[in-house]
Amino acid sequence: MKKVIVVLVVLFIGILFAGCTSQSSTPAATPTPTAVPTTVATPVPTAIPTPVVTPNITANVTVVPTAVPTPVPTPKVVKLTFTQALTISPVGTVYVPVGTTVCWINNDPYKPHGVRSIGTNSGYNFGTVNIPYGSMYNVTFSNKGSYDYVTVFQPQVAWKIVAS
């Protein structure tokens, strides 16, 4: 094994000596630097954070029920309009819920109009009412029933309001 070490040491020294003594006749070329392309980073838009709503949580809360008032329904209004043609619009039987106010309106600038309730079975008798031009007459039907009436200028034509 000593022989192998001696051989290796001799080879190593020989390689070192050969590298130091060899000189080339041409001078070594100096490398020319090559241009390196410049890169510019493109800005990436950042996402706008979405707000997160977190509920307020309260521990050990006792809920005390409170009385909720019963809503009172707003009465509805149905408009019946007298025209210059001596008619009333809408024509025919009008169906309304109980509590509805029917409003007769005179839009005829030439004549006064009016309504008269008829029949004893109607449950509500509002008599005869004259309505001058630009005026109105209201009746609220608070009970279920069929209410018959005629207009002053057409007493032969019966109209009806049914409250249910």
Image (spheres, rainbow, N blue to C red):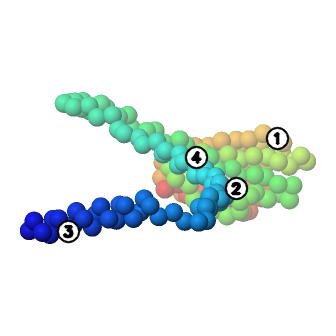
Is there a contact, CB below 8 Å, between mark 2 and mark 3? no
Q: Which residue is mark 3?
A: 7
Q: Which residue is mark 1?
A: 134
Q: Amino acid at mark 2?
A: Val
Q: Amino acid at mark 3?
A: Val
Would you say residue 64 is visible in this rendering?
yes
- Point out the tag, 4 or 2, that comes first from the N-terminus: 4
> Which of these two is toward me, 120 or 89?
89
Assign a secondary structure to mark 4. Answer: loop
Q: CA distance from mark 2 to mark 3?
A: 140 Å
Q: CA distance from mark 3 to mark 1?
A: 134 Å
Assign a secondary structure to mark 3. Answer: helix
Q: CA distance from mark 4 to mark 1?
A: 21 Å
Q: Which residue is mark 4?
A: 76
Q: How many marks?
A: 4
Q: Amino acid at mark 1?
A: Gly
Tell me: residue 45, above or below residue 137.
Answer: below
Q: Quadrant of residue 53?
A: top left
Q: Which residue is mark 2?
A: 150
Assign a secondary structure to mark 2. Answer: strand
Q: CA distance from mark 4 to mark 2?
A: 22 Å
Q: CA distance from mark 2 to mark 1?
A: 20 Å
- Point out the tag, 2 or 3, that comes first from the N-terminus: 3
Q: Residue furthest right?
A: 110
Is there a contact, CB below 8 Å, between mark 2 and mark 1? no
- Point out the tag, 4 or 1, that comes first from the N-terminus: 4
Would you say residue 155 is visible in this rendering?
no
